[in-house]
Structure formats: C-alpha cells, structure tokens
Amino acid sequence: MPERRVWIWTEIGADGVHPLSLELLTPASAMGTAEAVVFSPNGSGSTSVLGDNGASVVHLCEDQVFADYVVEPHVATLVELISSEQPDLILFPSTFPARDVMARLAGTLRVGVIANASAVEYDGDQLVASVGYGADFESRVTLASGPPHLVQVRRKAYTAEASGGSAEVREVPAVSASNGYRVQVVETVQETSEGINLEDASVIVSGGRGLGQPENFRLVEDLAKELNAAVGASRAIVDAGWVPYSYQVGQTGKTVKPSVYVAAGISGAIQHIAGMGNSQHVIAINSDPEAPIFELADLGVVGDALTILPKLTERVRSER
Amino acid sequence: MKIVVCAKFIPDPNLALVVDPDKKRVVRDPSQSILDPGDEFGIEAALQLAEKHGGEVVAVSMGPESADAGIRRAMAMGVERAILITDQSLEGSDALTTAEVLSSVIASEAPDIVVTATESTDAYTGMVPGAMAAMLDMPQLTFVRSIEVDGQTVTAQRDYENGYQTVRAALPVLITVTASVAEPRYPSFKGMMQAKKKPIDTRDLGAVGIDAGSAGEAGAREKVLDLSKVQIEKQTRVVEDDGTGDSVDEIVAYLKHAQAI
Ligand SMILES: Cc1cc2nc3c(=O)[nH]c(=O)nc-3n(C[C@H](O)[C@H](O)[C@H](O)COP(=O)(O)OP(=O)(O)OC[C@H]3O[C@@H](n4cnc5c(N)ncnc54)[C@H](O)[C@@H]3O)c2cc1C
Ligand SMILES: Nc1ncnc2c1ncn2[C@@H]1O[C@H](COP(=O)(O)O)[C@@H](O)[C@H]1O
C-alpha cells in the first residue's frame, strides 16, 4: 500500500512560514508522507525550513496573484492540484486566511470537514480527530467523505520538530478562476500590539471590562512590562475600543497557550476561555467570587483589580 | 437591495451544555435556546444597510420548528420575513449539509448580499459561510467590521491577524461579520408586536430539493465516534483580598512557582 499523503496548507507571512503551519508538519509526518502546499510569491525562501521540519515535497506556486489575501485564486489552484495529485488528508492551520480557503474548498469539492481539532491521527484506515465542545466536552470524530479529508488543527496542538530533512520542490501552475478574481484588496493596515507577540508569549497579562475604564488598562500593561509578558484583552473592551482587535483572546480572537495567564477583571465567558483555557497556569483577579473564571484558575484572587495590580507590579519590580 | 441574513437558533450559551451520551449530541432544548448572539450583529448590519439604501432583509434559518422563536427575535429587530427550513431528517446535520440546505434556499432568493456571523456560538466551525459562498458562486468577504455599499460595489474593512484590510467586491457577495460591525438594537415593544404578524415561510427538505438520505445524521460526512466529559483537574486556590496585601504575596509566590519571576 502506498504511503498516505498528508498535505499541510502553508501560510507565508513577513517572517516566512507561519508558525502554525510549521506545527502541522509534526502530525503530518506521523501519519504518512508530509507535503507542504505553498502558494506565495516569496514561497521559495521557505522550502528549506519546511524540509527541515519534515516536509518531503513542497508544492510551490509563486504566482504574483497570491501576494494578497484572495481566497478564490487559492481555492481554484488548490482544486486543480488536488485532482491531479490525490492527497489523502490536508491539514489547515487555525489562521483566518486558511480557514477561509478550507471552507470554500469544502463547499467546492463537497467534502466534509473537521474544524478545531486538537489532535488528529489514523486508527488503521480511519481518520480520528479530537474536537473540544464547549469547555467541558470532547468528541472524537471522523469523516465519511473524501479523500481528501480536510482537517483544521487548533493552534499549538503540536510542536514543530526540526529533523534535518530536505524537501523536493515541485512547481505548480496557478489556475485562474473561471469567473476571475472578484475580491480586491485596497489597503492593508498593520495594527500589531507593541511589545511581545501574544501567541509566542510564555506569560500573558489580560484585562477586561472589570478594569472600569480605558485609562486603567495601563495597570495591565505595567504589570506585563515588569513580567516581560504580552498583553491581552477580552472582547468586551476590544469592542468598546479600549484596545485594538489584535489584543483579543478568545473564540473570535487569538488562541494562546502560555505558561502563565493572568486575567484581571475578566469574567471568564466561554468564548474567552476558548482562547486561553489551555494555559498552563491561570491566575484570576476578580471582585466577584462567583465569576466563572475562578473555575478555571489555579490561583483565584477575589478582590479589586485596580488596587491589586499596582501593588503586584511594585512587588514584582522589587523581586527582580 | 435584497439582503439575506442567517439566523441560527442555538442552546443558550450562558447555560451549561447538556449532552445526550447515546446520541453523542448536544441536547437542544427549545425552551433554553435563543437566537445566536453572534447573528444579531449580522442582522443589525443588514438592517442598517437596508435603512440606508432601501431594500428588504430576509432571515434564513435551518433548525427545529421551535427555531421560530429565534426568528421572531430577528423580526422584532426589524427583519421583514423569514424562511425556516425544518425537517426531522435534518437532525444531526454537519457543516456541509447545513451549507447545502441554506445555500439552496438563499439561491432561490437571489440576494445582493448574504450576511452571516463569522462562526456560530455553539458549533464555531466557521465553515458554513465559506462553503455557502462556493455553492452560491459568490465572492466572500470575511471577518468584516464595517460595510459600505456604493451602487454595485461593496467596500468592507476586515480584521486579520495583524490589523485590518480594506477589501472590495461587486455584488452579489457573501459577508461574514464580527461583533465590531454594529451594536445590535434591542427590540422595541412595537417591534415585538409587529414581529408576531410577519410571515415565516416554513419549508421541509423536499421543498429545498435535497433528499433525506443525504441530510441529517445519515448524510453527515463528519461523524461523531464518541463524546466524553473532559476531566478538569484544576484545583483552584482562592484567596480573598482584604486590602492587607497578603493576596499580593500569594500571587508573587505563585508566579515564582510557575517560574514567571
Ligand atoms: C459569537 C461570540 C464570540 C465571542 N468571542 C469572544 C472572544 O473571542 N473573546 C472574548 O473575550 N469574548 C468573546 N465574546 C464575548 C464574551 O461572551 C464576553 O461577553 C466577554 O468575554 C466579556 O468580557 P469581560 O470578561 O471583559 O467583561 P464582563 O463579562 O463584563 O466581566 C467583567 C468582570 O470584571 C469583574 N470586575 C468588575 N469590577 C472589578 C474590579 N474592580 N476588579 C476586579 N474585577 C472586577 C466582574 O465581576 C466581571 O466578572 C464572544 C461573544 C460571542 C457572542
Ligand atoms: N442552521 C443554521 N441556520 C442559519 N444560519 C446558520 C446555521 N448554521 C450556521 N449558520 C450561519 O453560519 C455562521 C457560521 O456557522 P458555523 O460554520 O457553524 O460556525 C453562523 O453564525 C450563522 O450565521
């Protein structure tokens, strides 16, 4: 029996391969031959790191059309490639553009999908993925359609592992969608938070509506600075315009998995927990002893974040 | 301008999830279900567009018969009419079937704009809108936080990982919105009274043109093998901050234990 062919959808950012795509090579290599699909004008720079992390083939298309976020050309080219190469499984990272491509691809091929998988493997011939449901349940699911099986893997479900291999590069022609490319990107504006990237941070301090007013968010930033931590936020204060969307942690924001997550004035709504529930240690500061965040916290402090945060920052400073 | 907006009826996300271990499924108790709060943002955005440019907002929902309660809420906000696809054999449908059913109904309406939430609050696959866009052969604008229509052109701002983008497409188009797009209005008493008289067109699978064998649990391509409760092993240590500063000691000790200091 030929080896199972497992593709990973590779997103290329300003710094090369998106870390979430690189992580996918670990389960891909465990399940069969790992192959990376790279549609990006500067994709060739990434082939060595892909090889090093387990890809044996890179399907590369460097067409200029892929310079922008454009779902239809990605899907049109991918559909052609799938039909000629017949992969068994395609893994997608939990990034916004990858999700758009995967969803449109599923609708085009009319195959089933598994989203938000925290683990994926084959049991004999059967694909099995674990998917969390709410905060308390986990299901194991499979797909009765395909190939290809389409599975989106949650952030940080796996760790990238350099193995020292190298990949064979195969050029892929870009396919123009029959109806042209209908979405035009007029402008792209970077709005990243200053300091440490949320997704890479090992310590995160997040604030919520319990801080009372926008000026008080500074208390969170001060503590973060002292702890060398990244700064996060609940959606309530993102929507209220206190901080940019790039700070948002949760179901519709970033998924983080730091070693320590400090939540100040955050109630712990299920949609927030969806983004930080896998943190190793959670410290919660909330004035309401019944706040759901306490169910998840390792250390819960019932009290006023506005008085505790400055004291804490002071103490951490003196400890260093 | 005709706008179709998706309205999903979901178990109240503020209540604990109840699971039926035999059916390997979430128990959907209609009396404890509501219109997905995520969809209220799409409804609000659609209503604002229709108010500004003229036109009609139609809600489409696939769900149990009781989902009319969710639709009435959309109507109380201002949606004029609705289509509810309800059929016993739809129970257990996966994202793909849901997209097939909804898009087939949406196609029959030939809208200029389809608005959905980015992801549903109960399933949060985020797969239905993109799959529908493919089936409807519409361009998709996703994670949208503001929408402008000028003649046949839609210009939107969309969030992405590191900021936002301005994107543009010609109608018809499918748009998924985030919670930043508009603050959902609270239905007025008058709105609620009017909602009771607005028409809901209820259709079964036959009317949608999808055969029962390929829908619901039987037709689902995503199959649940088992569903289990996750053991949360967290032992929370709770301290009260009485203003003496002891809690700060505790936090510092914990930060050291976790090697953050
Ligand atoms: C479709 C959908 C997607 C969503 N996605 C996300 C998401 O990605 N991320 C997210 O965060 N939310 C998300 N939400 C919103 C989520 O449901 C909550 O509304 C939100 O997380 C609440 O933010 P919060 O905890 O800051 O505010 P609140 O719920 O208002 O909580 C404030 C907390 O602060 C406490 N407090 C008040 N004063 C003090 C004080 N002085 N000191 C200490 N504590 C104090 C209160 O006791 C309370 O617990 C989503 C919702 C929907 C419907
Ligand atoms: N059964 C349904 N009825 C109406 N709209 C739906 C349904 N399922 C999904 N949607 C729409 O598609 C969005 C994304 O859903 P999902 O892909 O399940 O996360 C939802 O927020 C709704 O706007």
Image: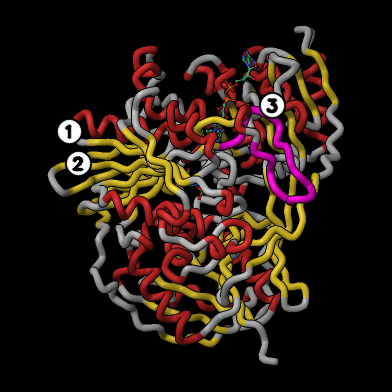
User: Whole-Å distance between the Cαs marked 2 and 1?
Assistant: 6 Å
Of tags 3 and 2, the one toward the viewer is 2
Q: Quadrant of the N terminus of chain B?
A: top left
Mark 3 Cα-neighbour bin, 10 Å: few <14, some 14–19, many ≥20: some
**Going 13% across and 44% down the picture, which residue do you hit?**
B151
Give the magenta-colored segment's residue range: B10-28
B259 to the left or right of A110: right
Amino acid under disc 3: Arg
Q: Amino acid at mark 1?
A: Gly
Q: Chain of mark 2?
A: B
Packing grade of label 2 (10 A; few <14, some 14-19, many >=20) is: some
Mark closest to the chain's N terminus, 2 or 1: 2
Camera-side residue: B239 or B47? B47
Residue holding disc 1: B54
Report which residue position mark 2 lands on.
Answer: B1
Assign the magenta stretch its main secondary structure.
loop
Chain of the residue on which disc 3 is drawn: A
Kind of residue at badge 2: Met
Q: Are marks 1 and 3 on the same chain?
A: no
